[in-house]
Amino acid sequence: MNYWLLKSEPSTFGIENLEQEGQSLWDGVRNYQARNFLKQMQPSDLAFFYHSNIDIPGIVGLARIVQSNVIDPTQFNPESKYFDPRASKEAPRWHTVVVKFETKFPQTLSLERLKKLFSPEELMLVRKGNRLSVLPLSLSVAQRLVNLCSNDA
DNA sequence: GCCAACGTTGGC
DNA sequence: GCCAACGTTGGC
């Protein structure tokens, strides 16, 4: 099993949305590095859900990958803001995953704390200038995160 | 709202 | 293949 971190702006799609919907297609990723990580995901992988562009950015919950290598349909939809005119059904450019709600933590594990607890080497998220919305976590980092989040309860 | 950091585009 | 211009991300 592998561990990941998925960023989302709660004004667009937050952990509450995932909780309500139960599961969701993780659509709209339009960055090749992020897409390549999405492609590596396997069902049963665990993803930490991160809220960005909010008062207190940080990890707010957990999601489970339930389906991987799913073609992102928004690339074909001219009405979508994720429309990609260079994509075709024969040659799709964007693949993603379906995730299901797992847990919402009682409080946010803030970016501020994450910066104190993890080095930039072990956690890409706290690297300066990091903008990647999908990133891998090592087993040891994932375990420490799980402990931190449950101790916070 | 600002702006640093980064990614993408496209002319050459 | 280079790189300037532009667009986007996301913390602050």
Image (spheres, coloured by chain):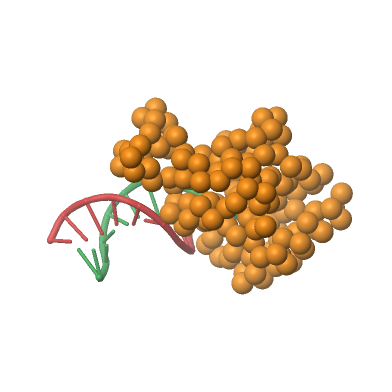
Chain colours: A orange, B red, C green
Left or right: where A19 falls relative to A35: right
Vertical relation: A119 (above or below) A6: below
- Residue A118, given in percent of the width and then of the height, sits at 70, 67
Residue at the location (34% across, 43% down)? A91
Q: Quadrant of residue A22?
A: top right
Q: Quadrant of residue A73?
A: top left
- Residue A138, given in percent of the width and then of the height, sits at 66, 65
- Residue A15, given in percent of the width and then of the height, sits at 68, 39
Left or right: where A108 falls relative to A10: right
Q: How many labels does the image show?
A: 0
Left or right: where A127 falls relative to A107: left
- Residue A43, given in percent of the width and then of the height, sits at 63, 48
Residue at the location (60% across, 60% down)? A136
The residue sitting at the top extreme is: A79
Residue in the foreground of this view, choosing between A27 and A133: A27
Query: Is residue A52 at all visible to an observer of this figure?
Result: no
Q: Quadrant of the N terminus of chain A?
A: bottom right
Vertical relation: C12 (above or below) B5: above
Residue in the foreground of this view, choosing between A40 and A29: A40
Query: Is residue A61 at all visible to an observer of this figure?
Result: yes
Residue at the location (57% across, 57% down)? A135
Residue at the location (59% across, 42% down)? A67
Vertical relation: A23 (above or below) A130: above
